[in-house]
Amino acid sequence: MTKIAVLTRDCGGVNAAIRAVVRTAVAQGLLVEGVMRGYQGLMSGDFVPLDRRSVSNIIGLGGTILKTAREEAFFTTEGQQAALAQVRARGIDGLIVIGGNGSLTGGRILAERHGFPVVGIPATIDNDVPGVDYAIGTDTAVNVALDALDKIRDTATSLERIFVVEVMGRKCGWLAMQVALAGGCEEVLLPEKDVPIDALCQEIKEGRALGKASWIIVVAEGCSTAVAVAAAVTAGTGLETRIAVLGHIQRGGRPTAFDRIMAARLGHAAVEALVEGRTGGLVHLVRDRVEFLPFGTAGDVKRTDIEYDYHLLKVLS
Ligand code: F6P
C-alpha cells in the first residue's frame, strides 16, 4: 500500500480524525489525498494532497476542511464505476470514510461490491450507526445542545413558561434523550417511545395545580416537530408555550475533548487496519479499546436502554 484517500461528512471531531489519519499515514510512509465534497468529489476526481502541514491547527475546528455534500449519484453503478476509475487513475490503494450511515454505506458498497479496501470511522451526531456505542461528534452535539437548553431554561424559569425544544437525530432519539437527561428536562418525545400528548397535558395541568411553574419538553425530530407539540400542549392545557428548534448549531462547534481523543484513536486505528489488510468494516471503541467491526454484521444493535433512561428522566424531573 502506497497511497490512501480520506473522505468525510461533517460534525465535531471530523477534522481531528482527518489529522490523525494523515499523520499516522505519513508516519507509515504513505501518501494521502483528501477527497473534496464527499462522494461527489470521489466521482468527479476532486482530490487534494494532504501532508503533515496541511492538517496543522485543525484539531479544534468544527465541520470538515474537506467540505462535504449529499450525493445520490454515487449509489448508481455508473457513479461507483466513476469513483473507482478516479481512485485507480491516482494510484490510491485504500479509502478511509469518516461519516454516518449514508457515508459508511457508500464505503460498504465499494468494499463488498467492488473489492476496494475501505475502512470506516463512525462520525455522526445522530449516534445511529448499528453496533457502535459512540460515533465521533455525538459528545460535541450533546454539549452544544445542552448549552442552548441551559440558556432556554433561564427564560423558562424566569417567565414560568413551557418550552418545547426540537433536536436533531434523524430517526434516532439518542441525541434527544441525552440532552433531556443532561438538561434535567421534564419530558422527552422520541421516535422509539410512544408518549400520548393527552397524558403529557394531564401531567402539566396536575403540576400547575401543585405550583410547578415551568417545563422543558425535548422533542426528537424523528418523532414530531416543536411547532406541532407546542400547539398540542397549548390546546390540551390552555397554557402558553414557546418553541426553539436547535437545528444545525448541533452539528457545528469546537469538538469536545472526548470527541478529539476518540478521533485520534480511531483515525490512527483506521490507517493501521488498512495497512494490515483488515478492511470492509469500521473501527470503533468498545470499553475504550479499538475494535474492528465488519460492515453489516452488527444487525440492529441498540446502544442504550431507552426505557431505563426515560424512567430515570421521569423520576428525576
Ligand atoms: O445526520 C446528521 C443530521 O444533522 C441529522 O440529524 C439531520 O436530520 C440531517 O443531518 C440534516 O441534514 P441536512 O444538513 O442535509 O439538512
Image (cartoon, rainbow, N blue to C red):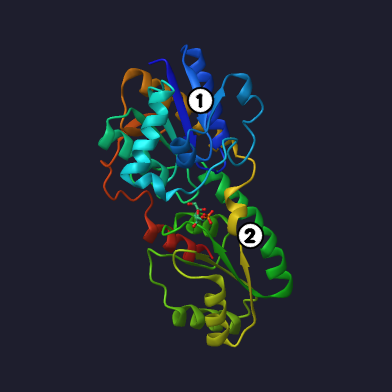
The type of residue carrying mark 2 is Leu
Q: Nearer the viewer, residue 206 or 154?
A: 154
The residue tagged 2 is 149
Disc 2 or disc 1, which is closer to the eye?
Answer: 1
Q: Is residue 16 left or right of residue 135?
A: right
| Residue at figure coordinates x 55%, y 65% from the top left | 166
Give the x, y percent position of residue 267. 47, 28
Image quarter in which the N terminus is found? top left
| Residue at figure coordinates x 64%, y 45% from the top left | 253
Asked if one can make out residue 286 in the rendered structure from this viewpoint, the answer is no
Q: Nearer the viewer, residue 280 or 259?
A: 280
Q: Quadrant of residue 257?
A: top right
Between disc 2 and disc 1, whose residue precedes?
1
Total labels: the figure holds 2
Asked if one can make out residue 296 in the rendered structure from this viewpoint, the answer is yes
Q: Secondary structure at mark 2?
A: helix
Q: Is residue 213 above or below residue 220?
A: below
Q: Is residue 211 above or below residue 23?
A: below
Give the x, y percent position of residue 276. 33, 18
**Which label was assigned to residue 302?**
none
Cα distance in 3D space between marks 2 and 1:
39 Å
Q: Is residue 246 left or right of residue 44?
A: right
Q: Secondary structure at mark 1?
A: strand
Give the x, y percent position of residue 226. 55, 71
The residue tagged 1 is 33
Farthest-out residue, top: 29
Give the x, y percent position of residue 288. 43, 32
